[in-house]
Image (tube, rainbow, N blue to C red):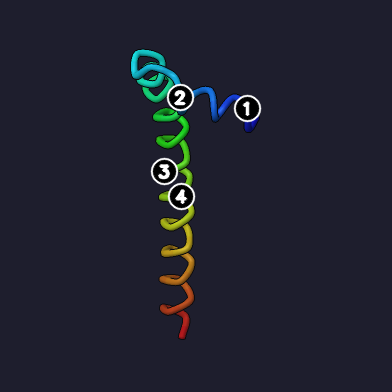
Amino acid sequence: MGELLVDLTQASIWIQLPVMLLVIMPLAGVGAVLLLSAIDRLGALFGKLKKKQ
């Protein structure tokens, strides 16, 4: 894995750009959606706990 990352950082921009657009950006989007879902659920849970008090 380390060798692959070193090769990618030293590669041409024409190789780096498609890798960024096709692999890393969708992964970041999925991570963002999961994080927002978790925050939304925590907010709903804390809202219900606050109403009970």
Distance of label 4 from label 2 (alpha carbons): 31 Å
Of the residues tagged 4 and 1, which is closer to the observer? 1
Q: Residue, x 42% and y 42% (percent of image)?
A: 33
Of the residues tagged 2 and 3, which is closer to the observer? 2
Tag 2 secondary structure: helix
Residue at label 3? Answer: 32
Of the residues tagged 1 and 3, which is closer to the observer? 1
Distance of label 4 from label 1 (alpha carbons): 30 Å
Residue at label 1? Answer: 3
Residue at label 4? Answer: 35
User: Is there a contact, CB below 8 Å, between mark 4 and mark 1?
Assistant: no
The amino acid beneath tag 1 is Glu
Q: Residue, x 40% and y 21% (percent of image)?
A: 16
Alpha-carbon neighbours of circle 3 within 10 Å: few (<14), some, or many (≥20)? few
Distance of label 1 from label 3 (alpha carbons): 28 Å
Of the residues tagged 4 and 2, which is closer to the observer? 2
User: Is there a contact, CB below 8 Å, between mark 4 and mark 2?
Assistant: no
Distance of label 2 from label 3 (alpha carbons): 28 Å
